Image (cartoon, helix red, strand yellow):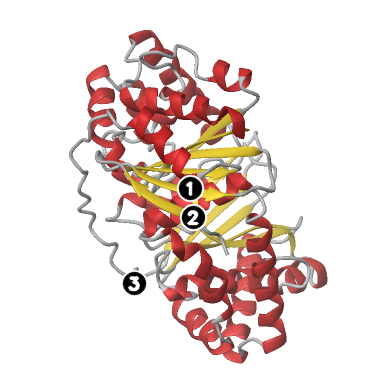
Amino acid sequence: MIQFSRFQLNNGLRLLVHEDESTPMVAVNILYNVGSKDESPEKTGFAHLFEHLMFGGSANVPDFDGPIQMAGGENNAFTNNDITNFYNVLPAANLEVALWLESDRMYSLNFDEQVLDVQRKVVVEEFKESCLNQPYGDAWHHLSAMAYKVHPYQWPTIGKVPKHVEDATMEDVKAFYFKYYRPNNAILVVSGAVDPEAVCRLTEKWFGDIPAGHTPQRRLEPEPPQKRLERRISDSTNIPTDALYLAFHVEDRLHPDYYVADLLSDILCNGPSSRLYRQLLKTEQLFASIDCYVTGSVDPGLLIIEGRPSEGVSLETAEAAIWRVIEEMKAEGVSERELQKIKNKAETNLTFSELNVLNKAINLAFYELLGDAALINEENLQYQRVTSDDIQRVARQVLTEDNCSQLYYRCQTAEA
C-alpha cells in the first residue's frame, strides 16, 4: 500500500508527497499532461522536441544538469503518446535544488534561437538514427498509420517525418510551451525521506507565483472499430532477417478489459513457459525470437505480437503458426494454473516496482493523471479479478483478423 498526501496550489499545480524513510534519497517527478497525441498532424514531434528543449536552460539556470550533479543527483525525461515526464533523484537533504530547477524551467524557458537550432538538429539526428537507419526502426510508423485512422496515435512520438521538427519556428515553440507547460497542466510528485508539510511549503515557495494558463481542452475523435485486416510489406536491405508484427486494438488504460489483455499478452509470450515461446520457438523452432505486449496507453491501445522467423521459415508460415496457437487458446481457454502463474508474475513485478522511490513517484503521477493516484493501490486487485473466462472472451473479441494490422519486413539482398 502506497500512502501519500495530496495538495494543490492556487495556480492549479497538483502535488503528491510519499514518505519513505527507508532511503536517504528523494525522487522529484513532474508530469506534464501533454504527449504526441496533442500535436497537430502537420507539426508532429513537438512533445519530443520539448523534452530536449527543457534541458536547454531557463531564466536563471543556463545549465540544468550542472546543479543536479553538484547536489549528488541525476535527472532525465521521457515522452510518449500521452505525457511528457521529467524526473530527478538526489539526496533528500538537497530536495530544494530539484524544486528550484523544475520551477525555473516551468516559469520561463530559455527561448534562444541557438538552443532551438541545436535541439532541432539533435532530434532530427535521433529520428534518422533510430527510425531511418535502424533495422525495423520505422515499425511504429507503419503500425500506427495502419491501426489508427482518426485518433492521433496514428503517428509515433518521434513524429511523422523529420521535416516537422526541422521547420519548427520560435513562434511554434513558444505557443506550445505556454499552452502545455503551465502549473495547472502538471502533476508534481515527491517521494522519499521527506516531510509532506515541509515539501508543501517548499513547493509553494518555488512554484506558487508561476501563473496558471488556460487549461488545454482535448477534443479527440475516438478511433472507430477496425473492420478489416490491414496489411503492409516493407522490403529492405537494412535488416538482418525477416520480421513480422501483428497489432490488435485493445481497451483504454482504465477499462477492466485492459488488465485482461495485459495478462493475455503474458500468457501468449512472457517467459519460456508461455504459449508462443514454448510451442513456436522451443518445440517447433519456427522463430528465432518472439514477443507479445500491450502498449498501455491512456486511450485505447494495441496488443502487439512481433517475431523473427528462423532461417528458411517464410513469413507466411510463421504467421500461420501464430494464428494456430491463438485459435487453440480461443477454443480451449486457459487453465486456472496457467492463469494463476501469470497473475503471480504480475504481482511480483508490481511489488518490485514499489521498492524504488523513483518508480513510485512516476507511477503516482501517472495514476493521478488517470483520475486518482489511489488507483495505484488497486492495480494488483484488478489483475487478481481476471478469470479464465475473461481471458477466453477477450481473446475471441480482440485476436481476430478484422481487428489486426499486419506488418511484414522482407529482407532483400543488396543486389536485388
Residue at image location 22% in from the left, 27% down from the top: 175
Instruction: Tell me the distance, in whole angstroms, between the alpha carbons under discs 1 and 2.
Output: 5 Å
Q: Which residue is mark 2?
A: 4
- Mark linked to residue 399: none
Depth check, front residue: 121 or 203: 203
Q: Position of residue 300 (x, y in %)?
A: 38, 63
Residue at image location 64% in from the left, 68% down from the top: 346
Dot 1: few (<14), some (14–19), or many (≥20) neighbours within 10 Å? Answer: many
Q: Which residue is mark 1?
A: 17
Q: Position of residue 226 (x, y in %)?
A: 34, 68
Left or right of 266 on screen, residue 303: left
Q: Secondary structure at mark 3?
A: loop
How many numbered circles does the render carry? 3
Left or right of 303 on screen, residue 202: left
Height in image: 189 above or below 300? Answer: above
Height in image: 74 above or below 364? Answer: above
Q: Earlier in the sequence, mark 1 or mark 2?
A: 2
Q: Quadrant of residue 185?
A: top left
Residue at image location 61% in from the left, 28% down from the top: 74
- Mark linked to residue 227: 3
Dot 3: few (<14), some (14–19), or many (≥20) neighbours within 10 Å? Answer: few
Are the residues tagged 1 and 2 within 8 Å (C-beta)?
yes
**Residue type highlighted by circle 2:** Phe
Depth check, front residue: 92 or 318: 92
Q: Secondary structure at mark 2?
A: loop
